Amino acid sequence: MELTSDIIKSIRDGDTSAFSGLAKEYGAKAYSLCIRILGNREEAEDCLQDAFMRLYRAIVSGQFEERSRLSTYFYTIVYNTAVDHYKKLRDKRFSIISIDVEGDNFEEGDDLTRGFTESGFDEGSESTGKTVSGNEVKEIIRKYVLSLPEQYSVILTMFYINDLSHEEISTILKLPIGTVKNRIFRAKAKLKELILKKFTEDEILQYV
């Protein structure tokens, strides 16, 4: 749910309950992005608090001018805040370059299942004929995303968890939209392949 102008005005007028509603609306999904980048719960919580403070100041000061969706604006803050925390806490550069890999050591599609057979299920197992619920599929997706290297996981977190469009992800990460679409397509295709080796219910295809 996007903020209306009236709610933004309420926040600017000092209505703390309006901003609390915003925090409740976006908190869990924003936390998922923080923890995907930082890999530590305490650091992710600190990052999220910092991101909300930055958003609050942007709204109150008028820096957020409602020219873009609030979610796009906020997740841009969350992503940049998480990268800033990563650099500060680890005294090194977040491997942002790996999200837009052009080097000889990377090919699109590499490492799409590395680590997933351990955290998800055995890629080589044959179908059991079981049906699977929507919640089970979402949990498989969550584990799969967490198993991916940065060039895929950050994009898929934004797509599946933060509900951002290809265009919004492209804007936030400053990546060509073709790169974003290609990463999502390849990861979704591999995920579908993995799930269909374990489950047979056609309904799962709506999730991937």
Image (spheres, helix red, strand yellow):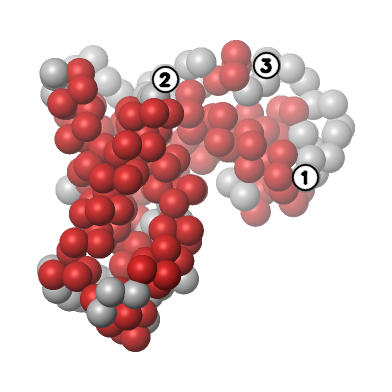
Image point (63%, 34%), residue name: 140
Answer with mark 2 or mark 1, whichever residue precedes in sequence: 2
Say which residue label 3 marks. Answer: 122
Image point (35%, 62%), residue name: 71
Identify the secondary structure beneath mark 3. loop
> Horizontal and vertical percent for residue 10?
32, 80
Looking at this view, is 193 or 41 the one in front?
A: 41
Decide if residue 154 is in sight here. no
Image point (19%, 70%), residue name: 60
Answer with mark 1 or mark 3, whichever residue precedes in sequence: 3
Q: Amino acid at mark 2?
A: Asp
- Whole-angstrom CA distance, mark 1 to mark 3, is 19 Å
| Relative height, residue 59 to residue 7 (above, below) | above
Say which residue label 1 marks. Answer: 133
Identify the secondary structure beneath mark 1. loop
- Whole-angstrom CA distance, mark 2 to mark 1, is 27 Å
Q: Amino acid at mark 3?
A: Asp
Disc nearest the viewer among 1 and 3: 1
Q: Amino acid at mark 1?
A: Ser
